[in-house]
Image (spheres, rainbow, N blue to C red):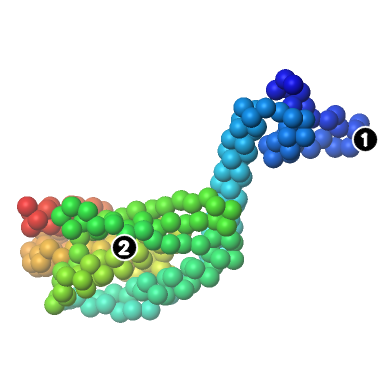
Amino acid sequence: MSESAAVMVPRQSANLPSQAVTPMQMLSMAVERGADMAMLEKLMSLQERWEANEARKAYVSAINAFKANPPSLEKNKHVKFGTTEYDHATLDQVCDVIGKALSQHGLSHRWEVEQGEHERITVACVLTHERGHSERVSMSATPDKSGSKNSIQAIGSAVTYLQRYTLLAATGLAAKEQDDDGKGSGAITSEQKDEIVSMLRETGADVKKFLDYIGAATVDEIPASKFQNAKAALEKKRVKSHA
């Protein structure tokens, strides 16, 4: 039996609307007509690709529906570091609110954690749709050795920080009022402040010298336009400390 005969699709009635035939239907017809193994393998491969594409489309549809009516994230923790004070949403708050909203659209999240060279920790947030398609966002940092943390606590602190930010990034969400934190659109966001503070603690940088270098009286007042320069300066200091 020829390959074309094995997958021949019956003609549609003139009175019935045309419907697309799925690879699974083609596979069933091929089995009924005694198609050889080579043809069956081709159809099975086609079915797998079709299912993967349908799962991807379902994921895109679900994440779009999620973003069309996103949950509101309230900042539930006050942070004070030197002269800097701000509020942010904690990991448990973020997980509880986002997790419930994702589940309404057949979505779930999980994290993958790895530790590489120079104690570098990488956390990937993986969003998965119930039909199997997944997408991920990854971020890396070194252990947060600020304060009197022991080695395990330092790793745990960094992992918690990365889990929170990767979940926010993967879902495209931000804590309420984070854009200017009530201080004007020219200042860095509360999430950026959190990142700078974490790096200051990790590197043990002199806060006053750092702020003088950036040209700001406090971390809260660092201009958004200088955020990348501030990060680059602290990253350079971190690299030197691990050299």
Q: Callout 1: few (<14), some (14-19), or many (20+) C-alpha neighbours within 10 Å?
A: few
- Secondary structure under tag 1 reads loop
- Can residue 130 be spotted in the picture? yes
The answer to which image quadrant residue 1 occupies is top right
* Residue 103: % across, % down: 56, 66
* Residue 166: % across, % down: 37, 59
The residue that appears at 47% across and 57% down in the rendered structure is 127
The answer to which image quadrant residue 185 occupies is bottom left
Pick whichever, 76 or 36, lies toward us: 36
Give the Cα distance between marks 2 and 1: 59 Å
- Mark 2 is on which residue type? Leu
Disc 2 marks which residue? 162
The residue that appears at 56% across and 46% down in the rendered structure is 56
Pick whichever, 54 or 86, lies toward us: 54
* Residue 32: % across, % down: 77, 34
Q: Is residue 6 left or right of residue 161?
A: right
Name above or below for residue 56 compared with residue 176.
Answer: above
Pick whichever, 170 or 42, lies toward us: 42
Q: Give residue 15's mark.
A: 1
- Can residue 64 be spotted in the picture? no
First in sequence: mark 2 vs mark 1: 1
The residue that appears at 93% across and 35% down in the rendered structure is 15
Q: Callout 2: few (<14), some (14-19), or many (20+) C-alpha neighbours within 10 Å?
A: many
